[in-house]
Amino acid sequence: MLAMAAVALGFASCSEDRDPVFHPAPEGSFKVYEPEMADLNITLEPGKVIELTCNGQPDYGFSAICDYSAEVSLTPDFAESYSIEPLNPSQSKIQLDQKDVATAITTLQGYTKEEQAGEYVNQGFQPLYLRAVCSFAGIEESRMVSNVVAYNKVKSFFSVRVPGYIYLVGQPSGWKDPFAINANHYEQWRLLEDADKIGSKIYHGTFDIKAGEAQFRFYTKLGTSWDDNSWGSQADDNPVDYELVDGTFAGKLVKGKGSLNFPGWTGGKMNITVDMSDNANVTITIKAE
């Protein structure tokens, strides 16, 4: 019996050892490598990328999917900085759309409105300083900031922040491929941030949806695949049925291709709000108008 108890205790001890326990990563352990193109002339263009390569996930005591982002500044002391979300926030090789980088530079230069385009003075090639940020959603202590690196010769263009948006994809939009080549088609199927709340990641849209066609999910970007950037009812590519109670519905969205389906929808205008301000708690609210 003593031997059996010792074995059981050993299994319990091993189980406890395997349980992940978060601890703050050591200061300075999260690093970005010097860019290979640091001293080359770079003229920013929409659709192209600037890259930062990290040394991997900080040592939090266990491995899990982190959120990566980048901060840029016009000065090495980061007295003023601008945060940019990469094309794939879960990858330690951070790719930044050069249009987003141009928006950061324009904003840091003091331009914030589209009507200021005529006042814009292009500074030519100038240094741009960058650093990476890594964190776990919901754990404030997990935020780690890397060392600072520079692209020394970057030429920008005028670009200011405009309300962000996501796309409704489904029966109302004809299930057309959510690809970048179909951007014109999806102009009318966007949910947008309020003009005075740019960066909130709270999106609104009102759509006229026919009876029997209230089946859809949402895409944060138009890309080249049905699998990327999709948020819906579940991970699996199967619809889940819901209903509006007293003309309203509230629920959660997850990454995946499960559509929301409202078989009892009798047609008319549907006001939809998707709140993505907390990546770990994405919500949807629907009201019949």
Image (cartoon, rainbow, N blue to C red):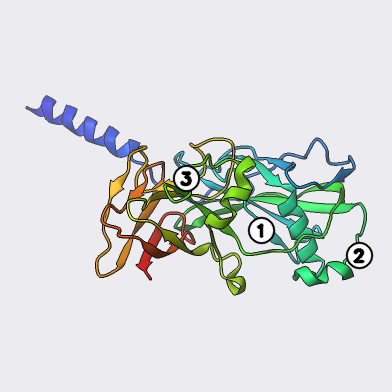
User: Which secondary structure lies at badge 2?
Assistant: loop
Which residue: 69% across, 42% down? 32
User: Which secondary structure lies at badge 3?
Assistant: loop
Q: Amino acid at mark 2?
A: Val
Front-most of residues 105 and 220: 220
| 121 displayed left or right of 94 | right
Which residue: 39% across, 46% down? 21
Residue 156 visible in rendering: yes
> Which mark, residue 83?
1
| 184 displayed left or right of 244 | right
Please state the horizontal and vertical placement of residue 284, each as a whole percent of the image. Answer: 39, 60
Residue tagged 3: 174
Mark 2 or mark 1: name the one nearer the start of the chain.
Answer: 1
Q: Is residue 221 above or below residue 201?
A: above
Position of the N terminus by quadrant: top left
In this view, the mark in front (3 or 1): 3
User: Which corner quadrant of the image does residue 37 belong to?
Assistant: top right
